[in-house]
Image (cartoon, rainbow, N blue to C red):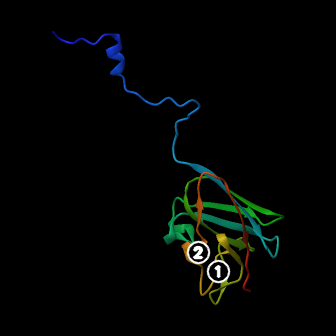
Amino acid sequence: MRHRPGRIGALTLLPCAPLVLGAVPLSGPVQSDVYASVTGLRSQKGQVLACLTTSPQAFPNCEKDPRARKLTVTAKGDVHLDFGAVPEGRYAISLIHDENGNGKLDTALMIPREGFGFSRDAPVRMGPPRFDKAAFDVGAENTRMAIRMRYLL
């Protein structure tokens, strides 16, 4: 005699998944917003150039990172940067106060003539800080920080 599943037997063959009320399936990687306010601007001339990157090789100049987020904001009044929603990960921000508006950091004998700043107020020694000194983690919560502009000349 062969066993033929009836209605009850057929139900046990259905794949089972736990039922969780109110559960929402994840629709992709976790993203959150990154905001920064700029402090210590010595003038309201020109613009602030900002770069957000995950690449240690591209920090502090984001030219080598095609996925970097770049912002240009006028230096008038309070300067706030909104990089938008970014996937979770490890990031670093670099800033330039481009006072003459030429789109680059001007130097005199390799010393910056315009302002610069880094996330986590990373220390500057003989050159820009390494990525790991400026890096911060972005997770499920929005990230807010203040970045101090520094001037050498």
| Horizontal side of residue 142 vs 37, given as left or right | left
Please name the amino acid that badge 1 sits on: Pro
Give the CA separation, mark 1 to mark 2.
8 Å
- The part of the image, by quadrant, that contains residue 81 is bottom right
Task: Tell how many labels.
Answer: 2
* Residues marked 1 and 2 touching at CB (< 8 Å): yes
Q: Mark yes or no: residue 84 visible.
A: no
Residue 82 position, x and y percent, is 69, 56
Q: Residue furthest front?
A: 1
Towards the viewer: 118 or 44: 118
Which amino acid lies under the numbered mark 2 shown in the image of this protein? Lys
Report x, y in % for residue 2.
17, 11
Name the residue carrying label 1.
123
Is residue 28 among what the camera can see? Answer: yes
Q: SS for tag 2?
A: helix
Q: Is residue 45 left or right of residue 52?
A: right
Which quarter of the figure has residue 23?
A: top right
Q: Which residue is the site of mark 2? A: 133
Instruction: Name the foreground residue: 100 vs 140.
Output: 140
Q: Residues within 10 Å of mark 1 (few under 14, many from 20)?
A: some
User: Which residue is drawn at the image coordinates 50% and 29% (left, top)?
Assistant: 19
**Horizontal and vertical percent position of residue 15:** 37, 26
Residue at x 52% of width, y 40% of height? 26
Which numbered tag is attached to residue 6?
none
Q: 147 or 2: nearer the eye?
A: 2
x and y percentages locating residue 17 in the rendered image: 43, 30
Q: Is residue 133 above or below residue 145?
A: below
Relative height, residue 127 to residue 100 (above, below): below
Which quarter shows the C terminus? bottom right
Which quadrant of the view contains residue 96?
A: bottom right
Q: Secondary structure at mark 1?
A: loop
